[in-house]
Amino acid sequence: MYRAFNFGLSLTIAGFVMIFLANIVSDAYLFGVESDINGFLGIFDLSSYLIPFTFIGIGLPFVVIIPLVWLSKWSRK
């Protein structure tokens, strides 16, 4: 279970880092350009956020469910 938790944690962190970096790159690009793009996606299309959201969607259940299983096992001891 420890490996599954680490797998989920690494996927979740990687997904959030990819989204964070995409927003930084988008904001840096739009800093000097006068544009009406103010949304979350910035200069990128929604399809470019598919992999980060997939990473978060796969990893987050591991990060949430496995600690709950651990806590239930420890509470029974």
Image (cartoon, rainbow, N blue to C red):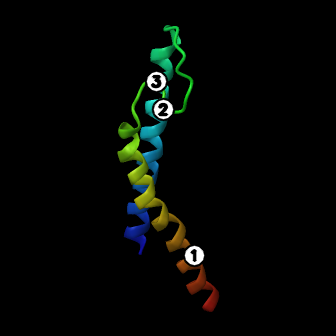
Residue 45, horizontal then vertical, whole percent: 39, 32
Q: Secondary structure at mark 2?
A: loop
Q: Are marks 3 and 1 in contact (CB under 8 Å)?
A: no
Q: Secondary structure at mark 3?
A: helix
Q: CA distance from mark 1 to mark 2?
A: 33 Å
Q: Are marks 3 and 2 in contact (CB under 8 Å)?
A: yes
Q: Quadrant of residue 73?
A: bottom right
Quick one: label 1 or label 2, which is nearer the N terminus? 2
Q: CA distance from mark 3 to mark 2?
A: 8 Å
* Residue positioned 43% across, 47% down in the render: 15
Query: Which residue appears farthest toward the bottom when viewing the image?
Result: 77
Residue 76, horizontal then vertical, whole percent: 61, 91
Residue 41, horizontal then vertical, whole percent: 48, 32
Q: Quadrant of residue 50?
A: top left
Residue identifier under label 2? 41
Quick one: label 3 or label 1, which is nearer the N terminus? 3
Q: Nearer the viewer, residue 20 or 72?
A: 20
Q: Of discs 1 and 2, which sits in the foreground?
A: 2
Q: CA distance from mark 3 to mark 1?
A: 37 Å
How many C-alpha atoms fall within 10 Å of the one at disc 1: few (<14), some, or many (≥20)? Answer: few
Mark 3: amino acid: Ser
Residue identifier under label 3? 26
**Does residue 39 appear left or right of residue 26 in this picture?**
right
* Residue positioned 48% across, 60% down in the render: 60
Residue identifier under label 1? 68
Mark 1: amino acid: Leu
Q: Secondary structure at mark 1?
A: helix
* Residue positioned 48% across, 44% down in the render: 16
How many C-alpha atoms fall within 10 Å of the one at disc 3: few (<14), some, or many (≥20)? Answer: some
Mark 2: amino acid: Leu
